[in-house]
Image (spheres, grey):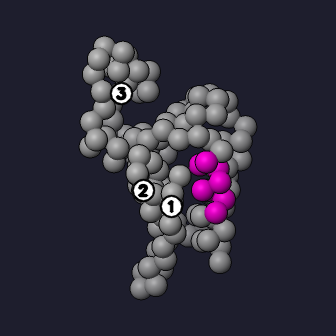
Amino acid sequence: MDYEFILDTNTKIHTVEVVGEQFAVGRFLNTEFGDVSNAPEKLNDLVDVLETKKDGVIQFTEWCIEVDNDELTIIHASQLETKTEQDKLIESEQSLSDVEWDFQSECGKADLIELLIAWSDFRAE
């Protein structure tokens, strides 16, 4: 996963930019943790949860993370379908449009944990 950390020196807001198919990961992190003063602690808490959780859903304000062993699906609340419902659509020859990349993404658990730790460190500096 390719990413870049940005600090707006005027507003003191930290953001992360993720390119490609994982674009929604950056949107998720910026929405849920971008303008939060205790974000490094919250990011570390999320790392702890991800390291122990094998399956289920982690709910946030506007986003959720579906955990399936070592695979994660990050989904915006505007997406009404769960990953299971999407799998059914894909099986019936329908596919996700490019627009949905803005609202959901799949990534490996280890990749997201690495990103969270690096972003937490960047924010703490």
Q: Is residue 112 magenta?
A: yes
Q: Which amino acid, mark 2? A: Val
1 or 3: mark nearer the eye: 1
Q: Secondary structure at mark 2?
A: loop
Q: Is residue 10 above or below residue 24?
A: below
Residue 69 is at least partly visible in this image: yes
Say if mark 1 contacts mark 3, CB within 8 Å. no
Say if mark 2 contacts mark 1, CB within 8 Å. yes
Check disc 1 and report the residue beneath it. 3
Question: Residue at 47% across / 67% down in the picture?
Answer: 15
Say if mark 3 contacts mark 2, CB within 8 Å. no
Point out the stretch of residues depicted in magenta: 111-118
Distance from disc 1 to disc 3, alpha carbons, whole Å, reads: 27 Å
- Along the line of sight, which residue is nearer the eye, 34 or 84? 84
Question: Residue at 36% across / 15% down in the picture?
Answer: 91
Check disc 2 and report the residue beneath it. 19
Q: Which amino acid, mark 3? A: Glu
Query: Quick one: label 1 or label 3, which is nearer the N terminus?
Result: 1
Distance from disc 3 to disc 2, alpha carbons, whole Å, reads: 24 Å
Check disc 3 and report the residue beneath it. 81
Q: Which mark is residue 54?
A: none
x and y percentages locating residue 69 in the rendered image: 64, 29
Left or right of 118: which side holds 72? left
x and y percentages locating residue 7 in the rendered image: 49, 77
Left or right of 90: which side holds 30? right
Q: Is residue 95 magenta?
A: no
Q: Secondary structure at mark 3?
A: loop
Residue 103 sits in quarter: top left
- Along the line of sight, which residue is nearer the eye, 73 or 62? 73
Mark 2, Cα crowd under 10 Å, few <14 / some 14-19 / many 20+, is some
